[in-house]
Amino acid sequence: MVDAPARLTVLSGPSGVGKGTVVAEVRRRHPEVWVSVSVTTRARRQGEVDGVHYHFVDDAEFDRLIAEDGLLEWAEYAGNRYGTPVAPVRERLAAGAPALLEIELQGARQVRERQPEAQLVFLAPPSWAVLVSRLAGRGSEPAEVQERRLAIAQAELDAAGEFDRVVVNDDVARAADELVSLLTAPSSPCLSQGTGAPTTD
Ligand SMILES: Nc1ncnc2c1ncn2[C@@H]1O[C@H](COP(=O)(O)OP(=O)(O)OP(=O)(O)O)[C@@H](O)[C@H]1O
Ligand SMILES: Nc1nc2c(ncn2[C@@H]2O[C@H](COP(=O)(O)O)[C@@H](O)[C@H]2O)c(=O)[nH]1
């Protein structure tokens, strides 16, 4: 990732759309892309590694991080809390290096407030039916949790217009191409040239 600007980029989008999959593909091609490791109170899924996928903490530790202003943003999502440790992001940007966050909508809005120069990218599904089938196909949550996440997803899709760019995840390689081009694009005071709205069909 030669000459990527030292910009904060936020990738958001509904649960199951493929944010983690697309970011993994970007990092497979460009291992130097730095992605923030969030803090969460959610229980660890099978295969998740503390400090790699998340920093898994209890409620008391999460409260402490909020109290000491240690989070750039945080949100309660589907019964758990998630947040971005602020220090590593600040260090990256201060060193003139880019940083990527993979977070949900409330957090993206907080980043917009605190860092208006950040680039906000929304990852959209090709259709509602595809989103439902990806979330179910992943099989990481029981049916009632999937339902809860899908209810939130409706509101998240409605907010896609708040983002600087919309990337449709119809194909992992193609969506990763698009994300790489956004990560390497020169910073611009006007980022509002959306590439299309998601569909909820
Ligand atoms: N373009 C794609 N085509 C087909 N399947 C995909 C595509 N992108 C992702 N998937 C699959 O969809 C499922 C959800 O993807 P992923 O876990 O990356 O979503 P996510 O947006 O990171 O979810 P969450 O926000 O819940 O962490 C996975 O099983 C993944 O393999
Ligand atoms: N506001 C934040 N949202 C985050 C953060 N880290 C992850 N997330 C988002 O939470 C949901 C659920 O994630 P899951 O791992 O339980 O499937 C998803 O949209 C993530 O992108 C964060 O630091 N802040």
Image (spheres, rainbow, N blue to C red):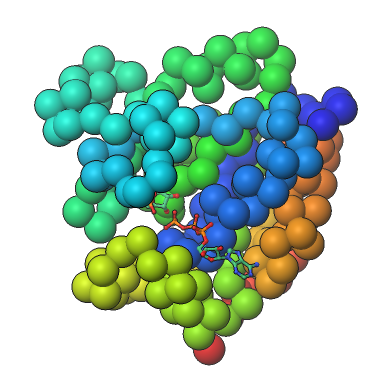
The extreme bottom residue here reads 201
The extreme right residue here reads 2
Q: How many numbered circles does the render carry?
A: 0
Residue 133: x and y, percent?
A: 48, 79
Residue 81: x and y, percent?
A: 25, 42
Q: Is residue 59 above or below residue 158?
A: above
Image quadrant in which you'd find residue 155: bottom left
The extreme front residue here reads 47
Left or right, 40 with respect to 30, comes to left
Left or right, 121 with respect to 53, comes to right
Taking the spot 24% from the left edge, 30% from the top edge, the residue there is 57
Taking the spot 17% from the left edge, 31% from the top edge, the residue there is 58
Q: In which quarter of the image is ligand 1?
A: bottom right
Taking the spot 42% from the left edge, 51% from the top edge, the residue there is 104
Residue 93: x and y, percent?
A: 62, 18
Front-most of 102 and 75?
102
Residue 81 visible in the current orientation: no
Q: Is residue 82 above or below residue 14?
A: above
Residue 198: x and y, percent?
A: 60, 74
Residue 146 visible in the current orientation: yes
Q: Work out which quarter of the rendered image holds the N terminus and state it.
A: top right
Image quadrant in which you'd find residue 153: bottom left
Taking the spot 73% from the left edge, 53% from the top edge, the residue there is 176
